[in-house]
């Protein structure tokens, strides 16, 4: 489990993802691009661009191909250009976000905010069942980490780390962040699920939807963990 002191590494990882998004966005806006073209547009070194391109290729966001040459071909190997894959284009397609937001707005206008909350809860029901299986299979002290792994499998890039009086569950990506900006019920329903799965009250400290870099949820130590900790402490003492 990650420690609080490792936060700078997480921030670095977040910065890396931000730069990779810029690289992918540049290809989306400008079409097939060479390393040199990307470096010039983004103000990066070609070595840095290649590193980000390698990661994006590995994630199936972009693909490399030979640059098409119109007219007489010059001597030497054609330059390689990078293009977005279908998966990469889907990542930038915001029409689904707009459709979802329009649908939720329609529900709210006709049936009220509570209907939106009911929708958010129902939407998470199937996901929560998968998470429940993962959490219940883990030891009590490892349940937050088990939930983080389950969330990661669903695209939330989640991690768990210890905190002074509990744990923090951090989600470095939110697939519904653009919609949640307008409908916080999505975040509220998710927080309820976390609380139910972990069997304790949890507190949402930050969300990507509200402009924070990471969705952060605080999970206090449960009575079970506190008892275990106290027992271990007593076991280590010499008898009086």
Image: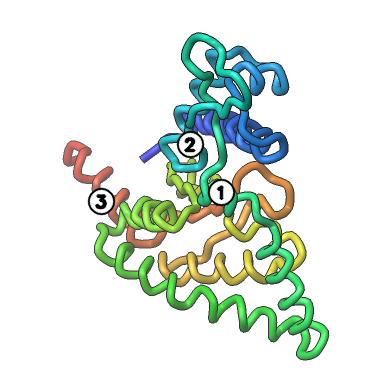
Q: Residue furthest right?
A: 109
User: Can you identify the residue that label 2 sits on?
Assistant: 63
Q: Residue at x 76, y 90 (%)?
A: 111
Position of residue 181 measured from the top left corner of the image (x, y, whole percent): 74, 60
Mark 2 or mark 1: which comes first in sequence?
2
User: Can you identify the residue that label 1 sits on?
Assistant: 173
Q: Secondary structure at mark 2?
A: strand
Query: Marks 1 and 2: in contact by CB < 8 Å?
Result: no
Q: Residue at x 52, y 33 (%)?
A: 10
Position of residue 231 measured from the top left corner of the image (x, y, whole percent): 25, 51
User: Mark 2 or 1, which is nearer the eye?
Assistant: 2
The quarter of the rendered structure image containing the N terminus is: top left
Position of residue 188 measured from the top left corner of the image (x, y, whole percent): 63, 68
Mark 1 or mark 3: which comes first in sequence?
1
Q: Residue furthest front?
A: 72
In the displayed structure image, the side of residue 105 where residue 74 appears, left or right: left
User: Which residue is at the front of the view, 8 or 79?
Assistant: 79
User: Mark 2 or 3, which is nearer the eye?
Assistant: 2
> Is 138 drawn above or below residue 216 in the view shown?
below
Local crowd at mark 1 within 10 Å, few (<14), some, or many (≥20)?
some
Q: Residue furthest top?
A: 75
Quarter occupied by residue 130: bottom left
Residue 73 visible to the viewer:
yes
In the displayed structure image, the side of residue 166 where residue 139 appears, left or right: left
User: Can you identify the residue that label 3 sits on?
Assistant: 231
User: Which residue is at the front of the view, 86 or 11?
Assistant: 86
In space, the residues marked 1 and 3 are separated at their CA atoms by 38 Å
Q: Secondary structure at mark 3?
A: helix
Local crowd at mark 2 within 10 Å, few (<14), some, or many (≥20)?
some
């Amino acid at each position: 489990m990650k420690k609080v002191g490792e936060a700078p590494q997480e921030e670095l990882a977040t910065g890396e993802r931000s730069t990779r998004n810029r690289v992918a966005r540049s290809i989306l806006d400008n079409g097939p691009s060479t390393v040199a073209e990307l470096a010039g547009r983004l103000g990066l070194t070609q070595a840095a661009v290649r590193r980000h391109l390698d990661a994006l290729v590995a994630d199936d966001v972009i693909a490399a191909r030979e640059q098409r040459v119109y007219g007489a071909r010059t001597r030497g190997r054609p330059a390689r250009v990078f293009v977005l894959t279908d998966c990469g284009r889907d990542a930038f397609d915001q029409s689904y976000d707009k459709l979802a937001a329009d649908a939720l707005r329609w529900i709210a206008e006709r049936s009220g905010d509570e209907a939106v909350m009911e929708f958010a809860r129902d939407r998470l029901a199937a996901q929560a069942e998968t998470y429940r299986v993962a959490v219940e299979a883990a030891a009590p002290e490892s349940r937050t980490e088990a939930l983080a792994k389950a969330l990661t499998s669903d695209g939330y890039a989640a991690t768990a780390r210890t905190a002074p009086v509990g744990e923090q569950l951090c989600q470095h990506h939110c697939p519904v962040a653009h919609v949640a900006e307008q409908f916080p019920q999505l975040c509220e329903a998710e927080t309820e699920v976390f609380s139910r799965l972990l069997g304790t009250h949890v507190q949402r400290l930050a969300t990507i939807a509200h402009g924070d870099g990471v969705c952060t949820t605080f999970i206090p130590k449960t009575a079970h963990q506190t008892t275990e900790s106290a027992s271990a402490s007593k076991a280590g003492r010499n008898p009086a």
